[in-house]
Image: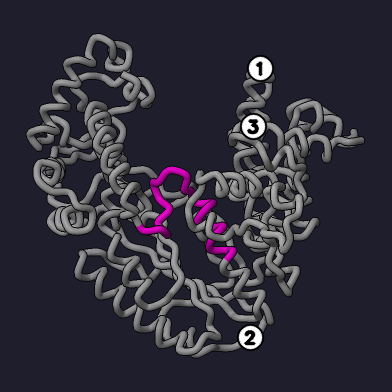
Amino acid sequence: MKLISSMKPAGSSVDCLPAKLVRDSVSALSPALMNIFNISLSTGVFPKVFKDAVVQPILKKPGLDPSTYENFRPISKVPFLSKVLEKIVHGQISAHMNSNSLLDVFQSAFRPNHSTESALIRVLNDILVASDSGSRVLLLQLDLSAAFDTVDHQILLNRLGSWVGVTGVALKWFRSYLSNRTISVQIGDCASSSLPLPWGVPQGSVLGPLLFSIYLLPLGNILNQHGLSYHIYADDCQLYVEMDEKNAGSKLAACMDDVKGWLASNFLKLNEKKSEFIVFDPRNHHGSHPVCDLLTLNPKQCVTSLGVKLDAGLTMAPQINSVVRSCFYQLHRLTHLRRILKRRHLESVIHAFITSRLDYTNALLIGVTDSALNQLQVVQNAAARFLTSTHRRSHITPVLAHLHWLPVIFRVQFKLLTFVFKALSDLAPSYLSALLTPYVPTRSLRSADLLLLHTPRMRLKSRGERAFVHAAPKLWNSLPIGVRQAPSLAVFKSRLKTHFYTLAFRQ
């Protein structure tokens, strides 16, 4: 009952029972549903009526050409009760994999306490640390074509058995879940006839993303064997290597050969048109490099990684400019809603369309120039004036204080410090926790009880001091001891906000 009540009432057009009806009648239906689910799990048979999916294509990005089929993502809408059963199985297999550390450490997709932001923090930290030592770093982004749709079921079942340890009735249940699936395509009021789906995992299902992560498990082993740093988020794979390392070119070439061979043998295709690489050079040297000459891909001066634009100089200027343009575009659209929305509703819309964009991966902006952050502050000021009808020449600080909106610089620090607290409380990915080292005094001093962190030395202020491993401990150690010693995440956030409100609006 708790599970069904917590889920969104979203199903497909072929649902035998509408999702809203199931939620509203959960107390009456739960005994019968529990009996159906228990029979399915004990016999290893996934109900056939749950295997029909309706695909509704959606554009991958706004503004793409709708006449090109490659620009659509085939999202499968499965029956609501199928999602409930998948959610139960997902909880069981996730607990099994987490307790036995079976998932790749550097796979951040569809895992609790992991996100695109945590993945980017680790990747950018490693790049900044390498740049601080004067080394050039090559970031290679691999893109897979229709990865979810080409998964081979037999290979996936073998992976479940040999890599995850799923056997017996449990493996039989997954075989039943994958076999005899059908799909139909619906656009508007038009729908196609159902056709069999002999391969792939449905995008939009509960189990699909986890099964795809299991399918990719051997890929991490291949990258580790070649000694390359990497990070995977679903089907987005990022490799990065210090170009000044000995044999860096041969390692990268051998790794790419093995990766392409593994992808081909597992019915996955590397999309070389969308795969790209960029070189971060702290000395701004121009010209070719032997490592770059080994790649058949075109070099870029700016790449988009998990929705964030990274430029070769690591100034974050393209990302900030993109956020500013997007926010002002949304703010212009909201002017048409001002007369029909109440104040509290308008504020909610502003948070949804403006604040969310300002806050997305803003932890990466630590250490960037004040002029760059001022561009984002102008956006926040404009949103505050729009909400409160404040004249553009009026002082904005009292308005932000009245709204309880932290200025952008403090929002950046707040996000970064929240990651630090999570990492110290086992609420963050292990690859972030590994970057933080408790401060150990040389003598028995009172500082041993202050929960301080060791701050490593960095040479370049524009590079190394922006890395998570340096910037996070430096900010953490500057906090009052009462904030650092908060007993829970909620208390920490509350105390940290109070601390920042005092700093921001002291006047």
Q: Secondary structure at mark 1?
A: loop
- Which comes before the other along the chain, label 1 or label 3? 1
What residue does disc 1 label? 342
- Alpha-carbon distance for marks 1 and 2? 55 Å
Residue at 18% across, 58% down = 162
Tell me which label, 1 or 2, sits earlier in the chain: 2
- Mark 2 or mark 3: which is in front? 3
Label drawn at residue 222: none
Q: Residue 314 at what x, y percent from top left?
A: 65, 67
Label 2, residues with CA under 10 Å away: few <14, some 14-19, many ≥20: few
In screen coordinates, is 296 left or right of 205? right
Closer to the camera, 325 or 49? 49
Mark 1 touches mark 3? (CB < 8 Å): no
Residue range corresponding to the magenta coloring:
104-125
| Residue type, mark 1 in image | Lys
Give the left or right position of residue 173, taking residue 30 as reference.
left
Secondary element at image label 2: loop
Task: Look at mark 3 in the image and give the residue it sits on.
Answer: 491
Instruction: Please indicate, yes or no, whether residue 317 appears anywhere in the rendered image.
Output: no
Q: Nearer the viewer, residue 438 or 127?
A: 438
**In the rendering, at what x and y percent does residue 439 appear?**
67, 58
Residue at figure coordinates x 68%, y 30% from the top left: 335
Q: Contact, CB < 8 Å: mark 2 with mark 3?
A: no
Local crowd at mark 3 within 10 Å, few (<14), some, or many (≥20)? few
The residue carrying mark 2 is 286
Q: Is residue 143 left or right of residue 161?
A: right
